Image (cartoon, rainbow, N blue to C red):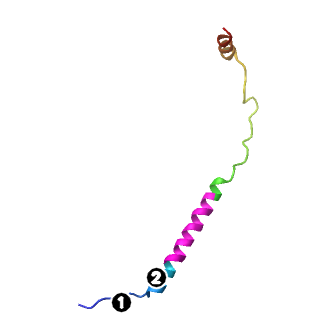
Amino acid sequence: MKKQASDMSRRQLLKALAIGGAAGAVATASGQALAAQPDAAPIAKKGSGYQESDHVRSYYDTLRS
Protein backbone atom coordinates (compact mmCIF):
# COMPACT_ATOMS: atom_id res chain seq x y z
CA MET A 1 0.00 0.00 0.00
CA LYS A 2 1.32 3.39 -0.94
CA LYS A 3 1.16 6.35 1.44
CA GLN A 4 -0.46 9.46 0.03
CA ALA A 5 1.74 12.52 0.06
CA SER A 6 0.21 15.71 1.34
CA ASP A 7 -0.14 18.57 -1.12
CA MET A 8 1.05 21.01 1.51
CA SER A 9 4.42 21.04 3.10
CA ARG A 10 4.67 21.49 6.84
CA ARG A 11 5.64 25.15 6.49
CA GLN A 12 2.69 25.90 4.19
CA LEU A 13 0.34 24.16 6.60
CA LEU A 14 1.55 26.20 9.57
CA LYS A 15 1.31 29.41 7.53
CA ALA A 16 -2.26 28.58 6.49
CA LEU A 17 -3.24 27.84 10.10
CA ALA A 18 -1.73 31.13 11.30
CA ILE A 19 -3.47 33.17 8.60
CA GLY A 20 -6.77 31.39 9.26
CA GLY A 21 -6.48 32.02 12.99
CA ALA A 22 -5.72 35.70 12.46
CA ALA A 23 -8.65 36.04 10.07
CA GLY A 24 -10.95 34.40 12.61
CA ALA A 25 -9.74 36.75 15.35
CA VAL A 26 -10.36 39.79 13.14
CA ALA A 27 -13.84 38.56 12.24
CA THR A 28 -14.68 37.99 15.90
CA ALA A 29 -13.36 41.39 16.97
CA SER A 30 -15.22 43.23 14.22
CA GLY A 31 -18.45 41.41 15.09
CA GLN A 32 -18.10 42.43 18.73
CA ALA A 33 -17.36 46.02 17.73
CA LEU A 34 -20.50 46.15 15.61
CA ALA A 35 -22.56 44.69 18.43
CA ALA A 36 -21.19 47.28 20.88
CA GLN A 37 -22.33 50.27 18.83
CA PRO A 38 -25.21 52.04 20.53
CA ASP A 39 -28.50 52.15 18.70
CA ALA A 40 -30.15 55.40 17.83
CA ALA A 41 -32.26 56.81 20.64
CA PRO A 42 -35.87 55.70 20.29
CA ILE A 43 -38.34 58.42 19.48
CA ALA A 44 -40.73 58.99 22.35
CA LYS A 45 -44.36 58.73 21.41
CA LYS A 46 -46.64 61.51 22.45
CA GLY A 47 -48.18 60.71 25.80
CA SER A 48 -45.84 57.85 26.57
CA GLY A 49 -44.04 58.19 29.83
CA TYR A 50 -44.86 58.66 33.46
CA GLN A 51 -48.47 59.50 34.09
CA GLU A 52 -49.88 59.75 37.57
CA SER A 53 -53.18 57.94 37.52
CA ASP A 54 -55.62 56.92 40.24
CA HIS A 55 -53.99 53.60 40.97
CA VAL A 56 -50.56 55.26 41.21
CA ARG A 57 -51.94 57.87 43.61
CA SER A 58 -53.51 55.16 45.77
CA TYR A 59 -50.16 53.35 45.87
CA TYR A 60 -48.43 56.56 46.98
CA ASP A 61 -51.04 56.95 49.72
CA THR A 62 -50.26 53.47 51.05
CA LEU A 63 -46.58 54.39 51.25
CA ARG A 64 -47.31 57.47 53.38
CA SER A 65 -49.35 55.52 55.94
Residue 37 rendering spot, x and y as whole percentages: 68, 53
In the structure shown, which secondary structural element does the residue marked by tag 1 occupy? loop
Q: Tag 1: residue type? A: Ala
Q: Name the residue furthest right.
A: 46
Q: Say which of 36 and 64 sits in front.
A: 64
Instruction: Please tell me how many numbered marks the rendered image carries.
Output: 2
For numbered disc 2, what is the local secondary structure?
helix
Residue furthest to the left: 1
Q: To which residue does mark 2 refer?
A: 13
Tag 1 residue: 5
Residue at left 38%, top 87%?
Answer: 6
Give how far apart the Cα atoms at labels 2 and 1 are.
Answer: 13 Å
Q: Which amino acid does label 2 sit on?
A: Leu
Which portion, as a residue range, is magenta? 17-32
Percent of width and height locating residue 42: 72, 42
Q: In which quarter of the image is residue 22?
A: bottom right
